[in-house]
Amino acid sequence: MLTKRQENILKLIVEHYVKLAKPISSNSICKKLKCSSATVRNEMAFLEDANLLEKTHTSSGRIPSEKGYRYYVDHLMELKKMNAEDMLKLQIIFHNNQLPLTDCINKSLQVISDMTSYATIILGSSSHNNLLKQIEVVPINDSNLIVIIVTDKGHVQHKEMKLDNISLEDIKKTVGLINNLIIGTPIDEISTKLEYEIKPIIGRYVTEHEKLYNAFYNVFTDFTTNDINVVGRTKFLEQPEFSSVDKIKTIFEKLDDENVLREIEKDDDNNIKIYIGKENNIDDDVTVIKTKFKNGHEEGTLAIVGPKRMDYERVVSMLEFIKDQVED
């Protein structure tokens, strides 16, 4: 463990670098802590030897290392309530009774991305853990209908579908075929089952079988991919750490990779978790802060991704607020 003075110096360096992305001068530390420059230099040298600080490439200034950020998060970070402005923007969303819960979460993460300049992610329950329980159709008029998909976890999703010149009887036969052959299948396997089990035989039961097959195939494909939403990828372009085109390309590719994103939700701990640098599988230069939520049958993971130079206190307070709003 560090001495109190060493902790104060590390805390000052982290918080200054978070705000300005520049090393803090030893003179500024001297003024804040009211100690000599020699003392500060000695303490900073100790922190560097302990791998809590590192030198920048462009100057002799010191910035927090990955280990320094971890020490700050584990020992020095002071969790605070959200400021009034941030809270008001999010409360307006959650107090809108016209919005479904999923829309509230998506809109709130968009707001957080705009306020922080970080990327935000929502991951619904893994499609493999949701089994198809039932599919229903509700006609709106002669050519439009609503398809309702229900999973065993109680998750319900609906999508409007347009089918011209197809009888309601053929639509009902197709739904019956799907319900008879695919009930109990994981959602992310349904497209495959449709192709290999429904497509070869649907022509025996309905006339416009190709149109019907394609329409329902598209509905299930949309449903499978709809439980991951990444907001604010381009926010990385606003961060000075990510000026390299190759670095940005690598991060964008990771944020587009479902397997990478699904790793974020593997930890079953419902508390807020912070993965700094090499602790996450997106990039050594980013931090991922995430939490799980559950409201009735709705469950998933919320995550915020930004540079290691992240405003940890603010992000944690925002995630806690959203988690409380969702679960209330």
Image: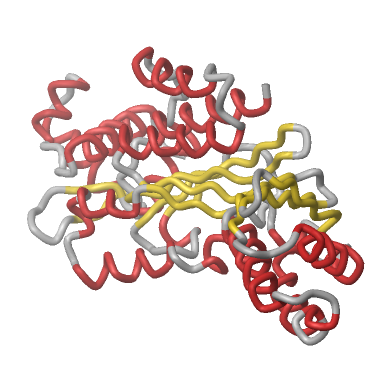
Horizontal side of residue 324 vs 54, given as left or right: right
Asked if residue 133 is positioned above or below residue 170 in the image, the reply reads: above
Quarter that holds the C terminus: top right
**What residue is rendered at 64% in x and 64% in y?**
165
Q: Quadrant of residue 82?
A: top left
Residue sitting at the far right: 180
Horizontal side of residue 183 vs 8, given as left or right: right
**What residue is rendered at 55% in x and 43% in y?**
302
Q: Position of residue 299 (x, y in %)?
A: 70, 42
Query: Camera-side residue: 285 or 227?
Result: 227
Q: How many marks?
A: 0
Query: Camera-side residue: 19 or 203?
Result: 203
Asked if residue 256 is positioned above or below residue 146 in the image, the reply reads: below
Q: Position of residue 208 (x, y in %)?
A: 70, 75
Q: Position of residue 179 (x, y in %)?
A: 87, 63
Q: Position of residue 40 (x, y in %)?
A: 19, 35
Q: Quadrant of residue 118?
A: top left
**What residue is rendered at 64% in x and 37% in y?**
271
